[in-house]
Amino acid sequence: MKKFVCFDLDGTLIDTLTGITKAVNVTLKEIGLPYQYDKNTVKTFIGRGAKRLFNLACKNNEKPADFNLFLKNYEKYQYVSEPFNGVVDTLKELENRAYSLLIFSNKPDEILQKLIKDKLGEINFIKVQGQDNKYPPKPDVTLLKKILAENDLLAENGLYVGDSVVDILTAKNINMKCAIMSFGYGDKKDINQEKPDYCFDDFKDLLNIL
């Protein structure tokens, strides 16, 4: 039996909100749209992929070229992001306990790969997967099923760790238990309604159930 933990990224492993907010506001200014947002508002846009995030920020007024500019700014400003407290030590301990570690995120894949290399490069993830435009974003699990099969992993032997309703639904759609981090970006009321298996205030609390 291969034990594994699959992680969301934004609001779960790394605090990316500052960089995403900066990218949104800089892009909106550059394309001449009269909107600017604080971090609490941008937080509500996160969870179902960069395209939807930018669409919400633009209030459906964007053009295709605008999104390409946003992606450039998204990458440019992501490096201010840092792992949440306890993330690195906990991931290392899970490796010591022989857990396979994966990331399955709606963050654009190319940007995700660079961020993980920069901020969590010391961790041996067996798979890091961001949004692939050939597949629907989370909570669809078509791509996740493929990843688990390729790595000889069974959903029943894993735990999905996230911070939002999207992550709970992702776990439910593949019949995997779910742990939610309350310090993340998800709406607390919506999370409570979906009743995740676990909800933690401290990332290190994962070690108490694994």
Image (cartoon, rainbow, N blue to C red):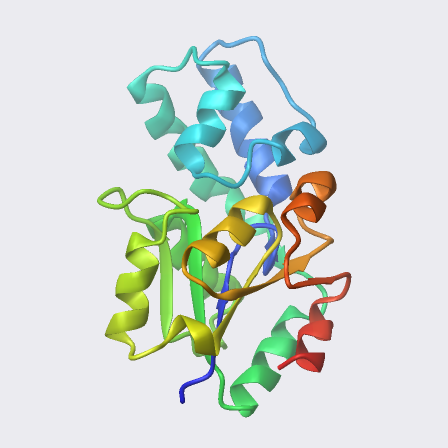
**Measured from the top left, where is residue 7 in percent x and y?**
51, 63
Q: How far across and how far down the image is residue 193, in percent? A: 68, 44
Q: Position of residue 3 (x, y in %)?
A: 46, 83
- Residue 91: x and y in percent read 58, 77
Residue in the foreground of this view, choosing between 33 and 12: 12
What quarter of the picture does the C terminus occupy?
Answer: bottom right
Foreground residue among 191 and 35: 191
Identify the residue at horizontal 62%, vertical 73% (top origin).
Answer: 88
Give the tally of numbered discs. Answer: 0
**Residue drawn 45% across the image and 74% down it:** 156
Q: Is residue 39 left or right of residue 118?
A: right
As drawn, 46 above or below 158: above
Q: Which residue is found at the position 67% from the left and 79% from the top?
A: 209
Judge left or right: residue 152 versus residue 83.
left
Up the image or down, 51 lies above or below 134; here it is above
Q: Vertical placement of 136 versus 25: above or below? A: below
Between 79 and 11, the residue placed more toward the observer is: 11
Picture residue at 43% right of the left edge, 39% below the top: 49
Query: What is the quadrant of the N terminus in the image?
Result: bottom left
The residue at the far right in this view is 201
